[in-house]
Amino acid sequence: MTTANAIAPAAMDQDTGYSLERRFYCDEEYYARDMERVAGRKWIVAGHVDQVRQKGDYFLFRIGGESLIVVRSDESRINAFYNVCRHRGSLICTESSGRVHRLTCAYHAWSYGLDGALLAARLMPADFAKQDNGLHRAHVRVFHGFIFVNLSDGEPVDFQTTFGDLEPYLDFHGFANAKIAHRISYPTSANWKLVVENFVECYHCTPSHPEFSSMHPADALIAFGAGPSSGPKDAVQSYLPTLQAWERRAAALGRPIGTVDDGPDSSHLRLLLQRTIREGYESETEDGQPASSLMGKRLGFDQGRMYVSFSPFTHVVATNDFAVLFQFTPRGPMNTDVDLTWLVDGKAEGYDVPKMIWGWDRTTLQDKRITENNQAGILSKRYQPGRYSQHERRVATFQQWYLRELGAPQA
């Protein structure tokens, strides 16, 4: 039986309501299948336009074994190319970011324009056609400031159909004109699914995240800690009157109100939730006071926050004065790049970076430890799939989505 043929039956054999078998979190073959069938077919945020404001600005986005050059070729266009010279396959860009006039391979000096066209290749035969040897492109879209890439060989799922309904919320928060205040990487020695599963449940929030929990109402964490359908149904019903009262106040200040809660049959498992933060708090900071000026089109502080998930790989959490972009990028069977980017309004000045990063920096360091411990435990011969609690409903939804993406039929 081939590896591909073996994985589908294993996916179908998973018990609903339990964590996955060990091989899904550890094995090379399963990771390769994840890259081919899941990560390699999704629109994933590589970065933000503030990283490439000027012509020639570029940065590298690494996912799995691939390296992409994301580069601005002119005022209106951002390209994404595979970082592979068409001569003999060397990496072209080796620095993580920079500014260039052209893309030149240091090995044999082949050079390419910012549009990917081959400009120079020394001493090639007379029948060599430069026009046939430009850089290989990846699919790329810029959406409200976020740069999405897609590694699909063929035509990917339609972008506007997939994300168009999120436009009013992203526009309100002003992401297209935002600027980067700070970035931190938290490389994590754990399978990407463990990183995602941890992020989409708040069962662990109270025991593991004192800073995060201090900024939020306890009943909100139980009901909606990780999204619209992440908590017990009775907790959701109990919190709804508070949420609805806040929605009326927030709408009066111009905030568009709505929810997105994709199920396991969706292409990207998107999520949108807006809710209150701790009473008396204006922002998700240690003392509840703002770290920057209002973002986007806000008319005033409304004591709320937004959580939007473009896919399990990319999430944004936005309070009134700043937002955090979370990127969970698979790099190996038991290695995931976890990158956080703090964004502020494009006109913000004098913002307080230590105040801004206080909560999510500590929370992400805690999550790094949690998921690495989780991975280490799963490597034991005594590991067996454990049953999910009522507070881990979104983890079960993610699992169903993931198994469907692998090709396993769902009941």
Image (cartoon, rainbow, N blue to C red):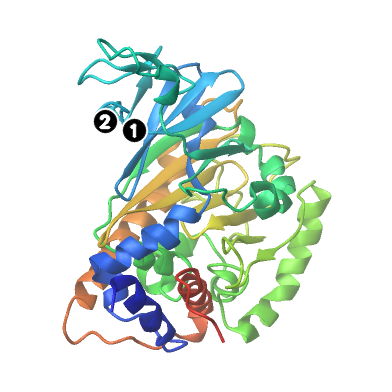
Q: How many marks?
A: 2
Whole-percent x, y for residue 51 in the image? 46, 28
Asked if residue 74 lies left or right of residue 206, the reply is: right
Spatial CA span between label 2 and label 1: 5 Å
The N terminus - image quarter? bottom left
Q: Position of residue 221 (x, y in %)?
A: 54, 71
Residue nearest the observer in this picture, 272 or 245: 272
Which quarter of the figure has residue 62? top left
Direction from residue 22 to residue 129 in the image, left or right: right
Evaluate whether residue 137 shows in this view: yes
Q: Amino acid at mark 1?
A: Asn
The answer to whether one can see residue 19 in this image is: no
Task: List the residue tagged with mark 2.
Answer: 91
Residue that numbered label 1 is attached to: 83
**Residue 163, horizontal then vertical, whole percent:** 66, 51
Q: Mark 2 falls on what kind of element?
A: loop
SS category of the residue bearing label 1: loop
Dot 1 alpha-carbon crowd within 10 angstroms: few under 14, some 14 to 19, many 20 or more:
many
Res 66 quadrant in image: top left
* Residue occupying the point 77% across, 51% down: 256
Q: Is 130 displayed left or right of 224 in the figure? A: left
The answer to whether 137 is drawn above or below residue 384 in the figure is above
Task: Find out whether the residues at labels 2 and 1 contact each other: C-beta distance under 8 Å.
Answer: yes
Residue drawn at 59 percent across, 18 percent down: 75
Residue type at tag 2: Leu
